[in-house]
Image (cartoon, rainbow, N blue to C red):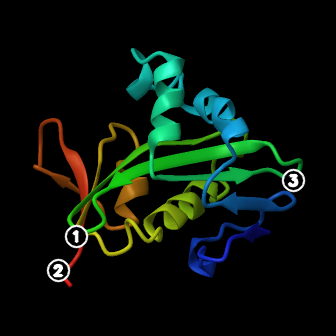
């Protein structure tokens, strides 16, 4: 079962083995586990683990998921001005936990953070997860070429 107050039933995956716990801010002692989840990914290929570590610790929004033993198995972080723009970075789920809806629930938790919830545009870049992000309303901008993906909301 997935536990998080802001994760809706539509964002939950079924079934998960045991209980997955989501957290709005992983503990500082979990940053190395978060780095290990994303250090080998293509977008961090030329980034030193120490730099990825500083980026996680410096991000005002950082969410994670823990397996039943309490180990960090997923991470995502973002920066935001709280009004106009936010950028999502370093979304990663441990390979053995992929395909179970953890990434979907984690991104839902991230997008519901107060610093992102009312932002007009949420940006990210990907070259292999377009379909995943499209489920949340992200579209390629500009179309063609090397796009970034943007979730645009009505101005409030």
Q: Is residue 71 left or right of residue 77?
A: right
Disc 2 + disc 3, Cβ < 8 Å? no
Disc 1 + disc 3, Cβ < 8 Å? no
Instruction: Name the foreground residue: 100 vs 107.
Output: 107
Mark 1 surroundings within 10 Å by alpha-carbon count, few (fewer than 14), some (14 through 19), many (20 or more): some
The residue at the point 70 percent across, 43 percent down is: 73
Q: Earlier in the sequence, mark 2 or mark 3?
A: 3
Instruction: Name the foreground residue: 43 vs 79.
Output: 79
Q: Is residue 112 above or below residue 26?
A: below
Q: Quadrant of residue 63?
A: bottom right
Measure the C-alpha gap from mark 2 to mark 3.
40 Å
Measure the C-alpha gap from mark 2 to mark 1.
6 Å
Circle 3 residue = 68
SS under mark 1 = loop
Which residue is at the far bottom? Answer: 156
Q: Earlier in the sequence, mark 2 or mark 1?
A: 1
Q: Is residue 56 left or right of residue 116?
A: right
Measure the C-alpha gap from mark 1 to mark 3.
36 Å
Q: Name the quadrant of the C terminus.
A: bottom left
Provide residue 46's location: percent of width, then percent of height: 39, 14
Disc 2 + disc 1, Cβ < 8 Å? yes
Instruction: Name the foreground residue: 31 vs 72.
Output: 31
Q: Name the quadrant of the N terminus.
A: bottom right
Circle 1 residue = 120
Mark 2 surroundings within 10 Å by alpha-carbon count, few (fewer than 14), some (14 through 19), many (20 or more): few
Circle 2 residue = 155
């Amino acid at each position: 079962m997935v536990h998080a107050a802001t994760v809706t039933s539509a964002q939950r995956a079924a079934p998960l083995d045991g209980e997955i716990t989501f957290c709005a801010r992983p503990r500082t002692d979990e940053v190395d586990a978060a780095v290990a989840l994303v250090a080998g990914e293509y977008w961090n290929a030329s980034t030193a683990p120490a730099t990825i570590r500083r980026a996680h610790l410096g991000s005002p929004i950082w969410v994670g998921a823990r397996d039943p033993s309490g180990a960090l198995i997923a991470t995502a972080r973002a920066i935001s001005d709280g009004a106009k723009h936010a950028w999502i970075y370093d979304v990663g789920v441990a390979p053995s936990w992929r395909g179970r809806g953890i990434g979907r629930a984690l991104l839902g938790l991230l997008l519901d953070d107060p610093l992102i919830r009312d932002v007009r545009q949420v940006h990210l870049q990907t070259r292999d997860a377009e379909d995943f992000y499209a489920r949340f309303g992200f579209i390629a901008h500009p179309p063609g070429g090397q796009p970034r993906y943007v979730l645009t909301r009505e101005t409030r």
